[in-house]
Amino acid sequence: MRVLRCPECGLEVPPLSPSNTCPRCGEPLFLEVDPEDIVREGARSLVPGDLKRVTLGEGGTPLIQHGRLLLKLEFLNPTGSFKDRGAALTISRALAAGWRTVVEDSSGNAGIAVAAYAARAGIRARIYAPADAPQGKLRLIRAFGAELMTARTRDEARRAALEDRSGVYVGHVVEPFFIEGVKDLALELVRSGERFDAIAVPVASGSLFLGLYKGFEELARLGLVDGVPTMVPVEACGFAKLTRYLKTVFLACEEGARSLLADALRLTAVPRLRQIAERAGRVSPYVIVVGDESIGEALRELYSIGLPVEPTSAAVYAAAKHVARDVGGRVVVPLTGSGLKYVPAPSELLDRYLFGAAPPR
Amino acid sequence: MRVLRCPECGLEVPPLSPSNTCPRCGEPLFLEVDPEDIVREGARSLVPGDLKRVTLGEGGTPLIQHGRLLLKLEFLNPTGSFKDRGAALTISRALAAGWRTVVEDSSGNAGIAVAAYAARAGIRARIYAPADAPQGKLRLIRAFGAELMTARTRDEARRAALEDRSGVYVGHVVEPFFIEGVKDLALELVRSGERFDAIAVPVASGSLFLGLYKGFEELARLGLVDGVPTMVPVEACGFAKLTRYLKTVFLACEEGARSLLADALRLTAVPRLRQIAERAGRVSPYVIVVGDESIGEALRELYSIGLPVEPTSAAVYAAAKHVARDVGGRVVVPLTGSGLKYVPAPSELLDRYLFGAAPPR
């Protein structure tokens, strides 16, 4: 791997320095990968080969067909979300750099992933999360031995993490190696041999969107694809940030409503927002904003075909169905998070959608 | 595929008849696969190719190294356990045969798997389970739209399911296609290219043990392996059935004690017991019986390296460590079930081991 570079002012930063934003202008950095470092066709990864990889077996998730949708089962990553891809590389960098403690802020899944990979690498983790995150997620962070610090909101968790001086801040909302880890998802979609016309992409911090985009860009540089495909960002009702930049399609999202179900999308301060908006403007006709009625209905539908996902993934599924009808063709749906973190614990909100009126037992 | 055959009296039964035990002598049947039906080297499955497969993307799970252990992450199957492999083929047969309702009994994971694959295929499922199964597992069975019927014990659930005339009984404790589905696990271990000297195999109904055994036998017929490797059965303290047939190693299992943690191994009436014992006698020096102190310690260790498994998998991990010390060499550990079905809901028993004295939040 070569260098971290600021996309704004061009400043170069060594890849193992404890930076994820530009020390000069504050913009989140990207890892600049030399074409020679990118593994060629036939290999299994777009990740720079000179980084010793901390792994729990992430990636290589199934892709199954359902009508005109191609469901990419990212919830079958080791800790139950696509965040494992990013956490693997984030913690690989931390290990290479010799950091003893890492600090992360998360709505849940990224915190679980960083906690697990840090445990695997023998690194201490302090995870900041909102107290109203699903309790199952908070319990999992602790089960991996991480120190859990709760804050009032998701945004406050981010602020508190930035002020924590007990370790190196590796927050996935800015960490460039987190984005590197996600790139292989693009490679897997291309290698699957399946034809697709668009991808519906949930956007909170944007690591999935930016990782996919960077992956397709690098695949294009290698001549493996023509360019970045249509990637339609999906946001939660009441937490939309891209509506300022793109035409917007609302699904069951009334003025003033706020999604309770899509907990993984309830981030409002997004450091990489401009980077996401710029790219989304190039590859998507619109952003889709989904509300709880639509999410709940999609969630029930996904369980009725045997897929135990989390509510946030149902939002993406609902949006993808819209894209398939509207744009036509086949749409990839990354089902990013596992419902096993939810269903085992009774929840009045979720049970209403999953079980109808009568909550079970 | 050719025929179901009774290993006891030799009777042949058509593969799509609603039988899993011999109509003449009662012995559980095996599917007899013609060598020409077995897919050759280079292909991805040992499953007869003429059965249209109902799939949720099962199999192809990661294999990661940890010291001298090779951990096969079977808990990353679609519904969180290796049972998905068996359920996929069981429901494929049901669909091919035109059955509208299937009946299953289970301690939890197999019931979840059958419920999910039945949902995927549009088949109704009635699942019998003990009322004291982990509540998270029972909730998941219902989330997939299956009808959940609880009984006082695991053994009573089996009896009640056998008496249910509302659908075709496909109980994984006898279903031959369930065993067929597990065979590919043997193929994946061989194809991984990793050398190993033994496999630790949890045994309740024996579908994993018999499936692996049959898989290796068929691979040997194809000349891909020399024979069936050392496969050490693992049972739970207080629920051991193989101790009558094999030398026994006890790990933290006192006389009269009964495991509470290893809920997936708490079956006492095992229709295929003789078949398992016969094969285990050929390929294992002993059976290992594990008690809760050892399971709890192993569980904590697995979470401390980032692996969210269920307690039953920790029993197998503890046993595998014994085998690695005793037999030497590298030992495969199928981590069969996901801890995400447990950790999200508070549990006094589990929390004691996972979090120490103070239960979280």
Image (spheres, coloured by chain):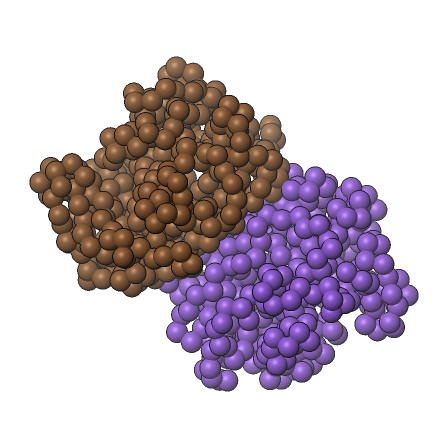
Chain colours: A purple, B brown
Q: Position of residue B288 (x, y in %)?
A: 42, 25
Q: Position of residue B286 (x, y in %)?
A: 39, 24
Whether residue B355 is visible to the viewer of this picture, yes or no, is yes
Q: Nearer the viewer, residue A258 or B132?
A: B132
Whether residue A105 is visible to the viewer of this picture, yes or no, is no
Please state, as top left, top right, bottom left or bottom right, where the C terminus of chain B lies in the image. Answer: top right
Q: Is residue B310 left or right of residue B37?
A: right
Looking at the image, which residue is at 82% across and 54% down?
A16
Where B136 falls versus B286 (above or below)? below
Looking at the image, which residue is at 37% across and 38% down?
B228
Residue A282 image-quadrant placement: bottom right
Q: Position of residue A323 (x, y in %)?
A: 50, 79
Looking at the image, which residue is at 80% across and 62% down?
A2
Looking at the image, which residue is at 19% across and 62% down?
B98
Q: Is residue B170 left or right of residue A345?
A: left
Q: Nearer the viewer, residue B324 or B147?
A: B324
